[in-house]
C-alpha cells in the first residue's frame, strides 16, 4: 500500500474541490440560462386570455347582454331598439364574422451571451473617444547568475509600443409603423431584442476580424500563430498552446471556438470504449475545456480556436447599448418611425502573446 505524502494528499483534496466547483458552476450556468429563457418567454407571451375572451369583462356574452338590457330598460321601452357593444378581454377583437381574434404575442430570438466579447471584461470608459495604452511586445536581456563578486549583473527590461485605439460604434436600425409601436409593447420588445442580438453578432465579427475605420487589427490578426507538431485533435492542440502561454507568463482562461468545432468536440468518442470524451452525453453540455471557459464565436476560423488570457484583453464600453426612436425624411406623414440601436466600445490588447490562434497538426 502506497502512503501519500501530505503534499500529495493536499493536492488530491484540492483537485476534488475543483471538480466539485466546476460541476456546480456548470449546473448554475444551465439553470441561469433556463430562467432567462423562461422570463423572456413570459415577457413575449404577455397575459394569457381566459377560455372565453368575454369572461374577464362583464362575464360571458349572454351575461353582458342581460346586464345591458337591464341597465337600459327604460330606453328600450321608449325607443323599441337598443344598441350596445360587448367587449372582449385583453386585446381580443370581434370581427365582422363574429370570430374573436386575440393577440398571441410576438416572436423573437433570445438575446443570449454571444461572441468572443461575452467572455471578456467590459469596463466602463464613459466620456472618451480614444484610449492610449502601451502594449507589451517582449523582453530585452535575461536575468541570470552574477559572474562573481564585483561583476556586472545581467540587465533585463520589458519593451512596449504605444497604441492609440479609437472607439468603435456598432449600430443597426429598423423602421416600424407608429401604430404598431403604440399598440404592441411586445412588438417593441421583439424589435429591441432582435437589434441587440444583431449588434452582438456584429461586435463579435469586429472583435475577431478587425475594422478598417477606425482601425482595429482584430484578435485573429493580433494572436500569435500556434501550429501543433504533435497533436491532431483541436482540444489537445489548445492545451499545448495554453501550456506554451503559461511558460511565457500568461494565464490562459478562455477558448474562442466556432459552434461547429465545439459540437465536434462535445460529440467526439473514444474509439476503444465508444464513450464520449466530454462525459455523459445526456448531461448538460460542458462550458469549459481543460479548465478554460468556452466562448462560442462563428467569427473564429473553422478548424482552429483562440486561446486567450482575458486579463490582458478587454472591451471598454464608452456608450452602453441604447435605442433611439425618431423620424427621418417624410416618415412623420407616413406614420413611420425609425428605431436606432447602438453601442460604442474600445477593444484593448495589452500584450503580444496574450492570444494564440491554434491549428492542430495536419
Image (cartoon, rainbow, N blue to C red):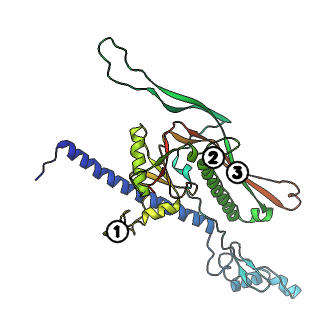
Q: Nearer the viewer, residue 316 or 58?
A: 316
What is the CA distance from the residue labelled 3 to the residue labelled 1? 47 Å
Residue under pointer 3? 171
Q: Position of residue 122 (x, y in %)?
A: 56, 43
Residue under pointer 2? 210
Q: Would residue 46 be visible to someone looking at this image?
A: no
Most extreme residue toward the left is: 1
Is residue 321 rendered to the left or right of residue 13? right
What is the CA distance from the residue labelled 2 to the residue labelled 3? 16 Å
In the image, residue 316 sits, relative to residue 13, either above or below, namely: above
Q: Position of residue 117 (x, y in %)?
A: 56, 49
Residue depicted at x 45% and y 54%: 360
Looking at the rendered structure, the secondary structure element under dot 2 is loop
Query: Which of pointers 2 and 3 indicates the residue nearer the eye?
Result: 2
Mark 3 and mark 1 lie on one chain; the one further toward the N terminus is 3
Looking at the rendered structure, the secondary structure element under dot 3 is strand
Most extreme residue toward the top is: 150
Q: Position of residue 328 (x, y in %)?
A: 84, 53
In the image, residue 71 sits, relative to residue 310, either above or below, namely: below
Q: Nearer the viewer, residue 362 or 185?
A: 362
Query: Which of pointers 1 and 2 indicates the residue nearer the eye?
Result: 1
Q: Position of residue 79 (x, y in %)?
A: 88, 85
The disc label shown at residue 271, or none: 1
Residue density around tag 1, few if under 14, some if 14–19, many if 20 or more, within 10 Å: few
Q: Would residue 256 be visible to someone looking at this image?
A: yes
Residue depicted at x 58% and y 45%: 221
In the image, residue 21 sits, relative to residue 214, either above or below, namely: below
Residue density around tag 3, few if under 14, some if 14–19, many if 20 or more, within 10 Å: many
Picture quadrant where residue 73 is located: bottom right
Looking at the rendered structure, the secondary structure element under dot 1 is loop
Is residue 301 rendered to the left or right of residue 142? right
Mark 1 and mark 2 lie on one chain; the one further toward the N terminus is 2
Amino acid at each position: 500500500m502506497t502512503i501519500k505524502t501530505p503534499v500529495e494528499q493536499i493536492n488530491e483534496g484540492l483537485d476534488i474541490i475543483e471538480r466539485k466547483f466546476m460541476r456546480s458552476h456548470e449546473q448554475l450556468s444551465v439553470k441561469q440560462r433556463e430562467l432567462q429563457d423562461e422570463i423572456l418567454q413570459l415577457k413575449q407571451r404577455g397575459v394569457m386570455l381566459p377560455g372565453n375572451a368575454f369572461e374577464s369583462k362583464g362575464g360571458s356574452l349572454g351575461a353582458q347582454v342581460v346586464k345591458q338590457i337591464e341597465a337600459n330598460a327604460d330606453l328600450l321601452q321608449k325607443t323599441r331598439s337598443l344598441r350596445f357593444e360587448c367587449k372582449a378581454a385583453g386585446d381580443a377583437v370581434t370581427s365582422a364574422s363574429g370570430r374573436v381574434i386575440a393577440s398571441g404575442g410576438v416572436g423573437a430570438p433570445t438575446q443570449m451571451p454571444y461572441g468572443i466579447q461575452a467572455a471578456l471584461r467590459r469596463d466602463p470608459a464613459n466620456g472618451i473617444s480614444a484610449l492610449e495604452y502601451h502594449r507589451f511586445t517582449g523582453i530585452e536581456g535575461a536575468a541570470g547568475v552574477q559572474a562573481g563578486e564585483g561583476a556586472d549583473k545581467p540587465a533585463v527590461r520589458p519593451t512596449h509600443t504605444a497604441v492609440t485605439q479609437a472607439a468603435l460604434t456598432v449600430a443597426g436600425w429598423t423602421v416600424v409603423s407608429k401604430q404598431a409601436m403604440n399598440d404592441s409593447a411586445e412588438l417593441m420588445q421583439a424589435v429591441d431584442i432582435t437589434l441587440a442580438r444583431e449588434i452582438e453578432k456584429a461586435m463579435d465579427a469586429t472583435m475577431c476580424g478587425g475594422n478598417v475605420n477606425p482601425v482595429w487589427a482584430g484578435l485573429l490578426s493580433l494572436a500569435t500563430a500556434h501550429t501543433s507538431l504533435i497533436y491532431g485533435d483541436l482540444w489537445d492542440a489548445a492545451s499545448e498552446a495554453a501550456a506554451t502561454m503559461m511558460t511565457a507568463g500568461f494565464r490562459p482562461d478562455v477558448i474562442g471556438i466556432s459552434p461547429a468545432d465545439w459540437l465536434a468536440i462535445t460529440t467526439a468518442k473514444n474509439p476503444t470504449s465508444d464513450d464520449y470524451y466530454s462525459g455523459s452525453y445526456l448531461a448538460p453540455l460542458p462550458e469549459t475545456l481543460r479548465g478554460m471557459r468556452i466562448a462560442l464565436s462563428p467569427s473564429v476560423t473553422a478548424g482552429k480556436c483562440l486561446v486567450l488570457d482575458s486579463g490582458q484583453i478587454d472591451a471598454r464600453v464608452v456608450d452602453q447599448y441604447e435605442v433611439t426612436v425618431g423620424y427621418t425624411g417624410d416618415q412623420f406623414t407616413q406614420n413611420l418611425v425609425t428605431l436606432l440601436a447602438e453601442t460604442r466600445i474600445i477593444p484593448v490588447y495589452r500584450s503580444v502573446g496574450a492570444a494564440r490562434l491554434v491549428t492542430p497538426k495536419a
